[in-house]
Image: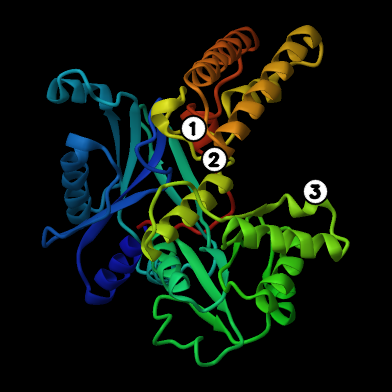
Amino acid sequence: MRDVFAGIAAWMEAGKTFALATLVATHDALPAPIGTTIAANEDGDILGNIGAGCYEGDIVEACLQTAQDHRTRVLNIDLAGADEVSSGNGCGGMLEVAVWRPSPEFLERARAIARGNETVQLAIPYERTGGQRVSFAYEIPARASLILVGATTLAAELAALARRLDFRTSVVDPRPVFATRERLSQVDEIVSEWPQDCLPEMLSSRTPIVLLSHDPKFDLPALRCALQSAAPYIGLLGSRRAQEFYRTSLRDDGIDESAIARIRGPAGLDLGGTSAAQTALSILSEIIAARHDRGGMSLHDIGGPIHGLNLSPLQRVVRDMPDQDSSVHNHIEALVKEEEALYSKAGSGGLSDAERGRLREIEVQLDRFYDLLHQRQGLRDAGSDPADAKLRPARQVENYTE
């Protein structure tokens, strides 16, 4: 999406006539994150994609109309209608898309979004079908940070792929012969310091860290710093023999087992690749899975929605469970523990066919519990209701529509 706003800024600087279309709500569908934006200009150039399939052309046409008449529009797209084209295999669901023209002041916002160094708040006022005036307020967060210890070939591969995944990468390595811009062209920041001197200030709950140096004089102090921080992911490259060496060294330092258990090592998911690029994909896949609290399993082997909340269906049930339903609560808690054990086993060694079947059975059973609870309580699924979850209340943020 940053590429889209970089292009928008370039169009504004060149005086192009254009309009934007932003996904503001969905129902029973999530083709792209809420806030995803597409833009089209008078020359027929298009930036971005919302994932509306055969309706993408309608969105572009609406952009061109708004570019000319400056009228904000709203499109309500029924993806089930795509079944006529897809022979009944359409994704289904509804999309709500606001089409708008930015004001001249939007240029600085577009530049800030493209840079990704700060969180940018936007508000898009529009009129829904039926005349209801609403304002879609949303944030485009700053890029997350990824810290790599060791200026290695793998660090360069990780930085190149991480950029596409909206990470800002920092490589920590005190060796000037290795930590060069020529070797690390895609890295955002090169920190030529010892890990123990800089990591305490760099690490936070939003900064995963991966140790790549294969050198204890770098990796051990980096591990100590990481384990004392709130880093959401601590990855350690190296063989299983090397992993045990580091864990033994940390135990000798008095670090307890619960802290050591936070280390993901050997880092990465079991994808079977061996090249530096494939290893980078494996590690970043595990980081993304950890960010969303997923096990990194194949979608083919698990049930439930493809896109959804970070919480599993079972966790959503427990979250919404009334306190007085203790018997049902206890039953679901038992299923939650069983599910967690199966996911843990899947992440470490894989599941048998019988265990995969049991996992699917649990998901189905708890989804039914969830549906019954929400029918009785009048609650809505926060993962699919556009009015309550996807359209946040208007906040005191500046408008940048004309």
Vertical arrangement, residue 185 with respect to residue 69, above or below: below
Q: Which residue is mark 1?
A: 308
Measured Cα–Cα span from mark 2 to mark 3: 38 Å
Ranked by sequence position, the earlier of labels 1 and 2 is 1
Q: Amino acid at mark 3?
A: Ser
| The furthest residue to the bottom | 176
Q: Is residue 342 left or right of residue 24?
A: right
Q: Which mark is residue 79?
A: none
- The secondary structure type at the circle numbered 3 is helix
Ranked by sequence position, the earlier of labels 3 and 1 is 3
How far from the left and from the top, in percent, is residue 277? 37, 63
Q: Amino acid at mark 2?
A: Arg
Q: Nearer the viewer, mark 1 or mark 2?
A: 1
Ranked by sequence position, the earlier of labels 2 and 3 is 3
Q: Quadrant of the C terminus?
A: bottom left
- The secondary structure type at the circle numbered 2 is loop
